[in-house]
Image: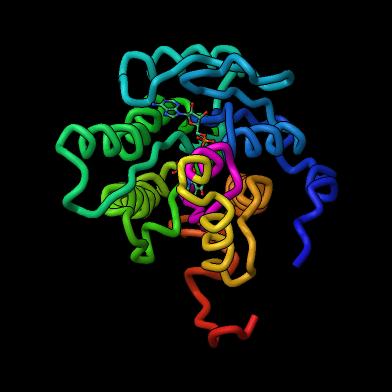
Amino acid sequence: MSLAPLASLTALADLNGLRAVVTGGASGIGLATARLLAARGATVAVLDLHPGDVEEPLLGFTADVSDDVSVRAAVDAAVDALGGLDILVNNAGIGAAGTVEDNDDAQWHRVLDVNVLGIVRTTRAALPHLRASGRAAIVNTCSIAATAGLPQRALYSASKGAVLSLTLAMAADHIGEGIRVNCVNPGTVDTPWVGRLLGAAADPAAERAALQARQPHGRLVSADEVAAAVAYLASPLAGSTTGTALAVDGGMAGLRLRPGAR
Ligand code: NAD
């Protein structure tokens, strides 16, 4: 299966005139998303712990989604710079490994604080602006971990399960205000995050091969493929789509292949 031809997607101008904020937009899925939204016509602000490397035309703002004061200040500054807000991509997130026995209370609080409450804080700050848009969309980065039992991911999966449920509840609460809310559920994506995981493995090549084999299409998902799904859900082209979780996982959630059948 060939990669999505990004050039053909960037020829779309469906986001012309729209203003977007992407959290965690300085790396991986968030950076690919910010670049694609901009290529399709949006003006884009990136909120990140380390926005320093974000290149033009993206606007970078320092924010820690686990700190309400920081989030409110960054959202206000971004909305000022953009002149309003139509699209919020809640993408910032952190990982955790282990079974339910392996993470202490501080780790549970930290991951839930960033992955779940980070969405709450950013959305809370953004909603007054999104209500004024008329074409508003929120896209949350969830995970295959919300819908499938993965080994050694108890805490991370619990956080993404909460993101999935929060997405549905938010979609119900805000549909009457003209705000659509959806999420993407990526499989294992080839980002710096996964690079760090592989780098820490005893045998990185074997670990990469195992992660590739777990996905029915036989490779890792690319950040650009997740970005394309986010951009679709964020676009007015998806104006009748709300309360959905779009899998971008090479078939991992939905397919049951016979062993060796691919
Ligand atoms: P990444 O580490 O490459 O990028 C994450 C970005 O988020 C970084 O720029 C980081 O600085 C920022 N960030 C982290 N904590 C933050 C905080 N408290 N406040 C603001 N910014 C913060 O990771 P990625 O692989 O691109 O992951 C992005 C999202 O995708 C996460 O929500 C992750 O759970 C999700 N996801 C990743 C994969 C994967 O395989 N890579 C799969 C499914 C879901």
Count numbered badges in the picture: 0
Residue 240 seen in render? no
The answer to whether residue 48 is magenta is no
Spot occupied by residue 105 in the image (x, y as percentages of width and height):
15, 37
Depth order, front residue of 205/161:
205
Q: Which quadrant is home to the C terminus?
A: bottom right
Q: Residue at (29%, 37%) from the top-left corner?
A: 111
- Residues 230 and 204: in front is 204
- The residue sitting at 79% across, 41% down in the picture is 13
Inspect this view and state whether residue 80 appears.
yes
Residue 170 % position (x, y): 35, 47
Residue at image position (42%, 49%) is: 175
Question: Compared to 17, does 64 lie above or below?
Answer: above
254 vs 250, left or right, is left
Q: Nearer the viewer, residue 132 or 148?
A: 148
Q: Is residue 203 above or below residue 150?
A: above
Question: Residue at image x 62%, y 55%?
Answer: 221
The span shown in magenta is: 180-197
- Determine the image quadrant of residue 44: top right
Which color scheme does this rendered protein use?
rainbow
> Residue 32: percent from the left, percent from the top?
65, 38
Looking at the picture, tell me which residue is in the foreground, 18 or 28.
Answer: 28
Residue lying furthest front in this view?
Answer: 202
Question: Residue 164: x percent and y percent?
Answer: 36, 54
User: In the drawing, does residue 68 fall left or right of residue 194?
Assistant: left
Q: Is residue 114 above or below residue 203?
A: above
Q: Quadrant of the N terminus?
A: bottom right
User: Left or right: 76 with respect to 15?
Assistant: left
Left or right of 28? Residue 104 is left
